Image (cartoon, rainbow, N blue to C red):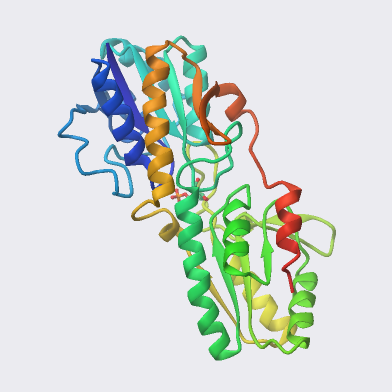
Amino acid sequence: MRIGILTGGGDCPGLNAVIRGAVRKSLLLGYEVYGLRNGWKGLLEKDYYILDHKAISGILHRGGTILGSSRTNLYQEGKNYYAEAIQNYKELGLDALIAIGGEDTLGVAAKLYKDGLNIIGVPKTIDNDLNATDYTFGFDTAVNIATEAIDRLHTTAESHNRVIVVEVMGRHAGWIALHSGLAGGADITLIPEKPFKLDEVCNVLIKRHGRGKSFSIVVIAEGAKIHTEDGTDKDGSFILQKLEKDAFGHVSLGGIGNIVSDEIERRTGYETRAVVLGHIQRGGTPTAFDRVLGSRFGVKAAELIEKEEFGKMTSLQGSHIVSVSLDDAVGTLKTVDDEIYKTAETFFG
Ligand code: F6P
């Protein structure tokens, strides 16, 4: 048996733990493993190297991915990349392929499975917005990094009697914002699922300062939506970093925190600063939770190949690692539920 493994989309702490888990189990099963470089691009270009014990040694605690990543979309309109990829899979003599990725990478995986390839998916994203799994790996690390940043910003905000707006990642879902906001004691948290009016945000801060507080922390997800006076919702993408879209049609987010910060200062008179955490949340060493989850996902992925359960994704449900259909994972996104939002709201103001 010869299997391939690749990592696609934005990198994520814990990717190397998954690769190590999948390779170690595969070697025990007697499989040969090809590591495809840079996501789906590696399959398109037949760019791979052999993953043996030596290749995966010393990587468990390392951030990033030893395989590299890209946002190559094999089903991009107007191209026939997927046909080339299917041909290459055959030419490389692959019997199965493990794709580690988020919504986009696994969307391609689900289509390739329908087109006849033996695919297994592993759910990755710091955003935690993939359906059919309680958690994706990488999320816990991102939340811990954001929480530590909020703790640090708290002390400087207090010293200077300032409002600090902390922008975290979260394109479609506010999981990182909500969890780090809860853990870091945010005074208000703004997420894509709950469009907000700037006046309402200011009123929360004014009320809090009326109780004698001289500083505040606002946590905002990069994809948060501002509900404007004319009744429409503007999402964070109106502050584009770059105009061009990636191969999956996504714009580059980042900057809504600065807009909100300026507006808070203008409307309340409180001195306000913005901090955009950006890719700091994706880099560096994974938490123990993500290393364990990643290792368990990796081992499970190889086991699914052994059982020939293709078209499936590894999933955490409760405390168990199970398999679910790739289709269930990629159909819709897992956005923040009302229960956790209501809990966070208790601490607003
Ligand atoms: O998908 C994970 C993510 O970190 C999003 O939260 C963010 O919008 C995006 O990736 C950033 O992508 P890039 O690294 O391409 O700028």
Is residue 173 shown left or right of residue 30? right
Count the labels in the image.
0
Q: Residue at 45% of width from left, 61% of height from top?
A: 145
Q: Nearer the viewer, residue 111 or 99?
A: 99
Pick the front one: 331 or 58: 58
Q: Picture quarter containing residue 345?
A: bottom right
Asked if residue 94 is positioned above or below residue 287 in the image, the reply reads: above
| Residue 117 picture location, percent across and down | 42, 12
Q: Compared with residue 333, is residue 155 higher up or lower down, i.e. above or below? A: below
Q: Quadrant of the N terminus?
A: top left
**Is residue 48 visible from the viewing direction of this image?**
yes
Q: Position of residue 270 (x, y in %)?
A: 67, 87
Q: Outermost residue, left direction?
A: 54
Residue 166: image location, x then y, percent:
56, 69
Residue at the image position 47 percent from the left and 55 percent from the top:
142
Tell me if 280 is positioned left or right of 260 in this view: left
* Residue in the image at 50% along x and 49% along y: 139
Quadrant location, the C terminus: bottom right
Residue 207 lies, in percent from the top left, at 79, 81
Please determine whether, in this image, residue 89 is positioned above or below residue 175: above
**Would you place residue 53 above or below residue 202 in this image?**
above
Inspect this view and state whether residue 80 appears: no
Q: Residue at x 24, y 27 (%)?
A: 47
Q: Quadrant of residue 67?
A: top left
